Amino acid sequence: MTIEAFKVDRTAPLLVEGARFHTMDELVPRADWMVVLGDKIQRLGVGPAPAVNQRLSLTGRTVVPGFVDSHIHFSQTGLDSLLVDLSPATNLDEVRARLAAEARGKRNWIFARGYEEDALVDRGLLTRKLLDDWFPDRPVWIGRIDYHSSVINSAALRKLETPIGLRGMLVAEGEPTGILRSEAFQHARQRLARYFPHDTMNKAIKAATALCSAHGITAVQALEGGELFGDEGMTALLRREDLLPLDVTIFIQEKNPFLTTKLGFTHVGGCILIDGSIGSYTAALEEDYLNLPGQQGLLYERTRELGNFVSEAHQAGVQLAFHAIGPRAIGQLLGTYEKALAKSPRYDHRHRIEHFELATDEQIHRARDLGVLVAMQPTFELNWGGPKGMYASRIGEGWRKTNRLRTILDRGMRIAGGSDANVTPPNPLLGIHAAVNHPNPEQRVTPHEALRMMTLDAAFAGFNDRRHGSLSRGKDANFAVLARDPLKAKASTLRDIRVLETWYLGRRVYAAPAA
């Protein structure tokens, strides 16, 4: 029976056989076959398979647990698929052509994403005046690839009612440049959300789901709502999450205790920002940016206010997660966690730091000793690492100290892998490739460690490891079928491994088209 024609009777056992199984279960690290009944894994084994009438033969394939993305802006990822993508553009002429194609025949907003000035061969910098020349009457919003800054034209500036005096509103000769960072960016983002109607957000959820399934993802920790993304996407996701072919754990990005104590959200944070990003010069460093003397980034939170919120949420039993990239931000956040835990000790709190890109040795030790988890995105190194990448252009030799995966694992910590989609694609195999091929050889990890980041340890970081993250008896029947074995493949080819099928709760939810 061919894979394409296979239909499952979920009332009867299904034997999955012939593949190489990487279970991520320390008690049963390898298996020759797996039996699924309904939505659960009934058992796994080595040697002769049991006599089961319903069989799925996957000879020559590899089966791994369904991937888990521990840090994804789910609704925004789907929305971005509906916007103009500037990431393939190599110069300003191509940027203009892509925007003009979107503008043709329409009279409303022009929304674009994926702009990265460092990736343009002419190092072209978009500004309000340039966008005004191109589109004098149409409001234009262009988001930088890291979601921490944007460029808008005069028409958009008027519609979004963004005051010139806000921190992060870059001004030249008394006039706004159109480049928005920090507070100005967040202010504008909140107002931007109202221009996306409900039907658009429903399409976004559908698009994000399809994208995840095609990459073998069966569970996401979705960072939704808040100042950066608005509540429209979260509302659409809440309406549909139980109907989606993947497990959704929502981290609500609001510092509002009412939402946790009264509405029942038990995971809070994600991109609640302690600082910004390296690419937008807003990550809180301890030294000046290489090409901006006197600038060391920004801390977005006051220590006392942050500490009060962390303490209150911690005592309410909530899991907390905050975005912190630079060492000053990481230090501030660790200090608030330390005080909250000293006041109210709690075993297995699983509080998190998202990104943790420039952590010092001392901060890695502190995080480990506090039981704090780190959720990291290895693909950042593929995009921006190395001696010629964006990190080096911003912080010089500091690129050698970004995303220290090997050091963190060697200190006995877990790393929850994710994508930060749509900053990087929701593609766990790309993340595995990036972790194994880290541009700093001292920070490379093994394929097995990278696979664990994207499965069991990511599930652990959302309190979901008892349900999924490994191929284990009694867990959800979530798995991905791969064309090649990521633990045996050449390191340089990991990103090219195809996901052939994705199974969620014992149902096949994705099958790759014939090659």
Image (cartoon, rainbow, N blue to C red):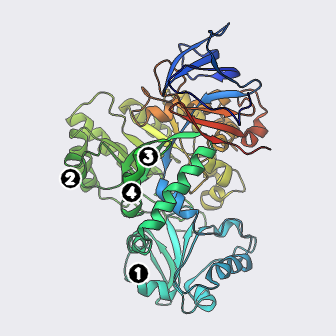
Quadrant where the C terminus sits is top right
| Tag 4 secondary structure | helix
Residue 80 lies, in percent from the top left, at: 55, 63
| Residue picked out by circle 3 | 243
Q: Position of residue 70 (x, y in %)?
A: 49, 42
Residue 117, by quadrant, is bottom right
Residue occupying image coordinates x 37% and y 64%: 227
Badge 2: residue crowd in 10 Å (few <14, some 14–19, many ≥20): few
The residue identified by callout 4 is: 234
Which quadrant is home to the N terminus?
Answer: top right
- Circle number at residue 258: 2
* 471 relative to 372 in the view: left or right: right
Q: Residues within 10 Å of mark 3 (few under 14, many from 20)?
A: few
Secondary element type, mark 1: helix
Between the residue at mark 4 and the residue at mark 3, the CA separation in whole angstroms equals 15 Å
- Distance CA(mark 4)–CA(mark 1): 21 Å
In this rendering, the count of numbered labels is 4
The answer to whether residue 285 is seen in the rendering is no
Q: Residue at x 60, y 63 (%)?
A: 290
Alpha carbon separation for disc pair 4 and 2: 17 Å
Give x and y (percent) for residue 170. 48, 79
Q: In front here: 483 or 97? A: 483
